[in-house]
C-alpha cells in the first residue's frame, strides 16, 4: 500500500465515492444534496487553496482518502491549523489503511508546523478516539446542531 497526494483529475471518481460513503455514514446524512450538487460541493472544497487530499492505493486501486484544510486558527492567526474534513476507508481494504493514511497526514501536518484538528463524529467507530489519542490529540469541543 502506498499513500500519496491525490491527483484531483485522475482520482476524482474515487475521492467522490469515498466522500459520499463517509457522508452517508455521518449523523447529518439527511442534509446531503443529490449527486450533482454533492459533487459540485465536494469539488469546490477540494479545489480550495490549502486543501490537501491524500489517497491510499493498493493493487492499483484507491482504497482510502483523507482531506485536510490548512488555515490560521480563528483566535490566533499566528497558529496554523490542519483541520480534517473527511477520511474514509473502502470496505475490504487492508486492515491498516486508516492508520497508514493518518500517519502520512500527520507527517505532512508536522512538516508544515500546523496543529492537527480531527473530528470524531457521533457515528464514528469507538476505535477512532484511541487512534486520535495515540497521536497526542485530545477532545476539545462538542458540536451541537439543530436540523429543522
Image (spheres, rainbow, N blue to C red):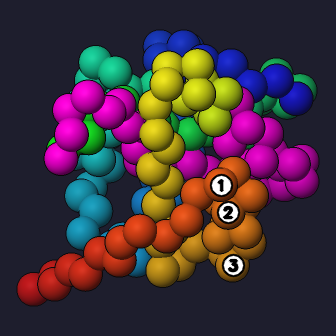
Answer whether labels 1 and 2 touch (C-beta < 8 Å): yes
Query: With respect to residue 139, does 104 lie above or below?
Result: above
| Foreground pick, 138 / 27 | 138
Q: Within 10 angstroms of label 1, few (less than 14), some, or many (20 or more) residues?
A: few
Q: Which residue is mark 3?
A: 126
Q: Quadrant of the N terminus?
A: top right
CA separation, marks 3 and 2? 12 Å
Q: Is residue 77 above or below residue 146?
A: above
State which quadrant residue 32 falls in.
bottom left
The residue that mark 1 highlights is: 136
Residue 69: % across, % down: 37, 34
Q: Secondary structure at mark 1?
A: loop
* Quarter of the rendering containing residue 146: bottom left
Q: Secondary structure at mark 2?
A: helix
Q: Horizontally, is 36 left or right of 89 in the view?
A: left
Magenta segment: does it hold 5? no
Q: Which contiguous range is marked in magenta?
A: 75-104
Mark 3 or mark 2: name the one nearer the start of the chain.
3
- Give whichever of discs 1 and 3 has the lower sequence position: 3
Q: Is residue 76 magenta?
A: yes
Residue at 18 percent across and 44 percent down: it is 74
Q: CA distance from mark 1 to mark 3?
A: 17 Å
Kindly identify which numbered label has been placed on residue 133: 2
Asked if residue 16 can be seen in this view, the reply is no
Amino acid at each position: 500500500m502506498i499513500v500519496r497526494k491525490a491527483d484531483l483529475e485522475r482520482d476524482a471518481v474515487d475521492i467522490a465515492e469515498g466522500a459520499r460513503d463517509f457522508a452517508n455514514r455521518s449523523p447529518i446524512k439527511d442534509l446531503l444534496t443529490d449527486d450533482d450538487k454533492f459533487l459540485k460541493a465536494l469539488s469546490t472544497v477540494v479545489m480550495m487553496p490549502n486543501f490537501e487530499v491524500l489517497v491510499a492505493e493498493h493493487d492499483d486501486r484507491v482504497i482510502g482518502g483523507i482531506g485536510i484544510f490548512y488555515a490560521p486558527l480563528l483566535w490566533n492567526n499566528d497558529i496554523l491549523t490542519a483541520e480534517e474534513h473527511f477520511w474514509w476507508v473502502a470496505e475490504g481494504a487492508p486492515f491498516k489503511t486508516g492508520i497508514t493514511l493518518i500517519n502520512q497526514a500527520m507527517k505532512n501536518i508536522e512538516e508544515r508546523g500546523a496543529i492537527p484538528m480531527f473530528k470524531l463524529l457521533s457515528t464514528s467507530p469507538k476505535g477512532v478516539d484511541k487512534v486520535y489519542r495515540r497521536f497526542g490529540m485530545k477532545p476539545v469541543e462538542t458540536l451541537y446542531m439543530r436540523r429543522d
